[in-house]
Image: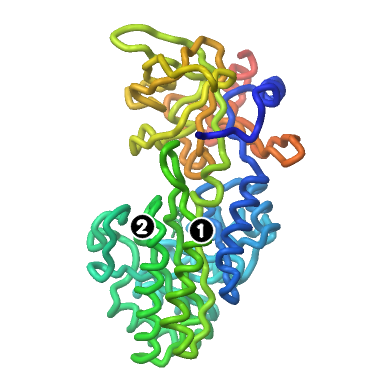
Amino acid sequence: MKTLPFSPQQLEAITAAYPTPFHIYDAAGIARTVRDLQAAFAWNKGFKEYFAVKALPNLAIIQLLRGLGCGADCASSPELMLSEAAGLWGDDIMFSSNDTPLWEFAHAADLNAIINLDDIKHIALLDQLPSFPKAVCCRYNPGSDFSMTNDIMGHLHDTKFGMTRAQILEAMALLKSRGVERFGIHAMVASATLDGTYYPQLAENMFDLALEIRRQTGVEISFLNLSGGIGIPYRPDEQAIDIYAVGAAVQEVYERMISPSGLEIALCTELGRYITGPHGYLVSRVRHIKETYKTYVGLDACAANLMRPAMYGSYHHITVVGKEAAAPTMCCDVTGSLCENNDKFAIDRMLPPVAEGDMIVIHDTGAHGHSMGYNYNGKLRSAELMLFEDGSVRLIRRAETPMDLFATFDCLDDFDHLQEIAHRI
Ligand SMILES: *Cc1c(COP(=O)(O)O)cnc(C)c1O
């Protein structure tokens, strides 16, 4: 059973102030999830969550998370800018990029961020910086040394990320010669997994690597990044992961492998989806119902607001507000208005009888939702709102206007003309 953090009456009031569609994020829910994660790993000295900014790159969200003790995981210069603007700096920022240009490493180094290298050849780029960073992490791709039955990120040999075991060992020796003081290892080999054994299995694999690094190079790993990849129950019949059980299982592996070694390794995570995913909702209204060979429920939102169903065929649960108790007797495709037939939020979904004007809530849009939005067909990305525990709501990003679409044209005369046209509508 999927619930909403607001009542239908509350939602009516919100939509009176802010026109649909919009994403709304439940601040209290996000805080609960962060506190549970931190409590589950409280046994580990130095544990820190670096929120994967790409999942929900909104300044107010990064600020909220900073207030809860999280850092930020960035993969680009603009994500670094957002993190700095949210008050993050130094060890609070993990720069986990790939195919990275020198100037982005320079930006990350300017902020004293922890630099996570995706490739051994990037050491030569860091050599070109005014001073070599003091905290460096290496991204590991275990190839066939890691297997899990489900949710693995494709075949790891075909995965573009990370270095081989041999490269990691060589990289560590090189980094030591460059005067690096704090060394880390990172790996992300699953995506959206609901398998509670993922982190414990990954930790075991990486602890083994940390021990081998010390044996072979003398380098002592001081932080280990389990990265993201933990999923959320998008479907009502799926079980959320028990994060306390995950934390306890990782602790068991740590005490067996690391405690006797005398190493002290701070763990970190770069979760995105797990932190904010379940606490975001795309609120939309039924604009038009069309009956042809099937029934099409057309919304005022489209794939530009939430791309996952069109791109991955992902399931997102849908609630017809005010009809929660009604039997789901209507089979329909729930669509957006893009001139693309894959612009469907749901296919052959059973819903309570839907009428034009009904309010629809699409669940679990708090990660990789708005942020994957795009402007195809001149569609505008929606507003983002934050819902606070006391029921108040704040606009944390306004909806785009046509002028935002036109802002990158370079001819000023046309710009004025466009502005004139836009203002007539
Ligand atoms: C995307 C990504 C994450 C976050 O992934 P989630 O599935 O949202 O947890 C973390 N780290 C890196 C390097 C990523 O690319």
- Looking at the image, residue 17 sits to the left or right of residue 100; the answer is right
In the depicted structure, whether residue 279 falls above or below residue 338: below
Where ligand 1 lies, by quadrant? bottom left
Q: Position of residue 170 (x, y in %)?
A: 33, 83
In the depicted structure, whether residue 359 falls above or below residue 269: above
Residue 44 falls in image quadrant = bottom right
- Of badges 1 and 2, nearer the viewer stands 1
| Element class at badge 1 | helix
Q: Position of residue 20 (x, y in %)?
A: 60, 23
Q: CA distance from mark 1 to mark 2?
A: 16 Å
Indicate which disc residue 190 carries. 2
Q: Within 10 Å of the Cα at label 1, are there few (<14), some (14-19), or many (20+) other Cα atoms?
A: some
- Count numbered badges in the picture: 2
Per the image, the residue denoted by label 1 is 243
Q: Position of residue 349 (x, y in %)?
A: 38, 23
| Residue at figure coordinates x 32%, y 12% from the top left | 294
